[in-house]
Image (cartoon, rainbow, N blue to C red):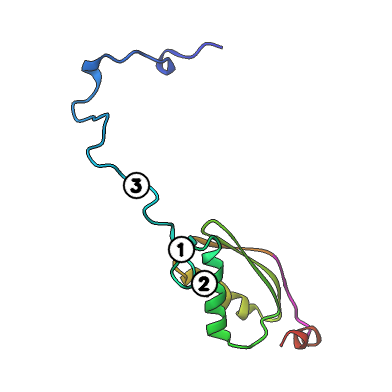
Amino acid sequence: MKFPELCSATERSPSSIPSNFSKKSSKPTNLFATWPPERCGVDGKYDYFGLVNRIIHRFEQRFGSMNLGDIRLTQRGAIVVLQGQFCDLYLLYELIAIALRTEGTEGVEINGITIFKSSDICTIYR
């Protein structure tokens, strides 16, 4: 397969390189001086699952000892994955809002969510 004329590689002479281009940086940069906010734990130290742990901590602050049912939280980078069974759609919205307000959260993904209408099933989780 032959590339079109516009896509072919061309040699660059030193005169074609912009004058403000520098091959060396004047200041060394340390890419690992700080960690991303999703890796910051409840205590402010590095925690690989820090975002999920901080969200769980906020859930406990907001709802106290109330049994929230069968909820599972996992973390995929800055995305929080919320799974489980809920008795109330409002509760699901509240949990999503809390997760989105937590620093470091880029989004909330909901998978395998079941919302029950039956009060019999819901009383098990309360």
What is the three-letter code of the residue carrying label 3?
A: Asn
Q: Earlier in the sequence, mark 2 or mark 3?
A: 3
Q: Find residue 66 and name its label.
A: none
Labels 1 and 2 touching (C-beta < 8 A): yes
* Image coords of residue 93 (percent x, y): 58, 75
Location of the C terminus by quadrant is bottom right
In-front residue for pair 22/71: 22
In-front residue for pair 28/85: 28
What is the three-letter code of the residue carrying label 1?
A: Gly
Q: Find residue 54 and name its label.
A: 2
The residue drawn where x is 24% and y is 42% is 27
* Image coords of residue 125 (percent x, y): 74, 84
The residue drawn where x is 51% and y is 58% is 78
Classify 57 as above or below 124.
Answer: above
* Image coords of residue 77 (percent x, y): 54, 56
What is the three-letter code of the residue carrying label 2?
A: Arg
In-front residue for pair 54/79: 54
Residue 94 lies in quadrant: bottom right
**Magenta span of residues:** 112-118
Q: Pointer 1: what residue?
A: 104
Q: Is residue 40 left or right of residue 13?
A: right
In-front residue for pair 120/30: 30
Q: Pointer 3: what residue?
A: 30
Q: Foreground mark, 1 or 2? A: 2
Classify 70 as above or below 66.
Answer: above
Q: Name the element at disc 3.
A: loop
Disc 3/disc 1 C-alpha distance (Å): 21 Å
